Image (spheres, helix red, strand yellow):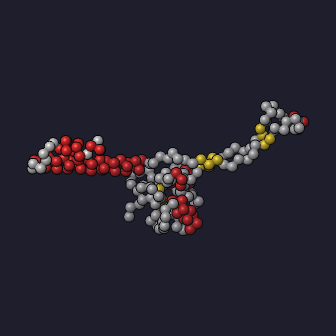
Amino acid sequence: MPVSCAAYGCSNRYQAGQNIHFFRFPISNNELMQKWISAIKRKNFEANQWSRICSVHFTAQDYQVRPGAHRLLLKDNAVPSVFPSFPSYLQTPIKIPRKPPTLRNCCGKDLTVNQLEDNVNECDDMCPVSNFKSVEVQTDNYYPDEEILKNKIKILQQKLRRKNKKIENLEDLLSNLKNRGLLEDEPQTIIASNFKAQY
């Protein structure tokens, strides 16, 4: 049975020598498995012992640090979170941590603690910055991996070959009709007169 990724829109399959790893669903940990299934956003998906998710869908923080090891291992609580094939409204927002609030001198004076105590009434503009919630940034600029682009190129090349074959067949048909005497004019003039709207 070929190994392929179960994530929505992912076409990664196992190939020897590639740098993509595949991980089994955590069937023994039902709570974690539900998180994985929820993360891949596939309707009516049921994971089994052959279901896999590729390493493209995990961040560097999801892996165990094992110096010198060749095999990647996920942390016990790792959940797939990177899905470049998802539409933008399904993308998980990235949280950017904020700096802790600091005192801001709005008067334009540099004050020491002693001066601050003396000048509390004088400078009421000195205030702590309110605590901000983390800023969420939606990433619309995702880059499909090389495999997806190769597949698109392959599909476009197939379409081009089919179009060229169709043109060749139509040219053969026109020359055949002309040889049988079924065409009175040159094929170009017939096409031009009948299909002017398309030119």
Which residue ends up furthest to the left in the rendered image? 180
- Left or right: 33 with respect to 51? right
- In the displayed structure, 42 sits above or below 149; it is below
Q: What residue is shown at x 16% (from left), y 48% (from top)?
A: 174
- Left or right: 193 with respect to 83? left
User: Between residues 9 and 193, which one lies in front from this camera angle?
Assistant: 193
Query: In the picture, which quadrant includes the N terminus?
Result: bottom left
Q: What residue is shown at x 56% (from left), y 58% (from top)?
A: 79
Which quadrant of the structure image shows residue 78?
Answer: bottom right
Percent across and percent down for residue 196 are 27, 43
Percent across and percent down for residue 194 are 23, 46
Query: In the picture, which quadrant includes the C terminus?
Result: top left
Q: What residue is shown at x 69% (from left), y 43% (from top)?
A: 99
- Left or right: 152 with respect to 22? left
Answer yes or no: is residue 44 visible: yes
- In the displayed structure, 130 sits above or below 36; it is above
Percent across and percent down for residue 15 are 39, 54
- In the displayed structure, 47 sits above or below 66; it is below
Percent across and percent down for residue 183 are 13, 47
Q: What residue is shown at x 75% (from left), y 45% (from top)?
A: 130
Answer yes or no: is residue 22 visible: no
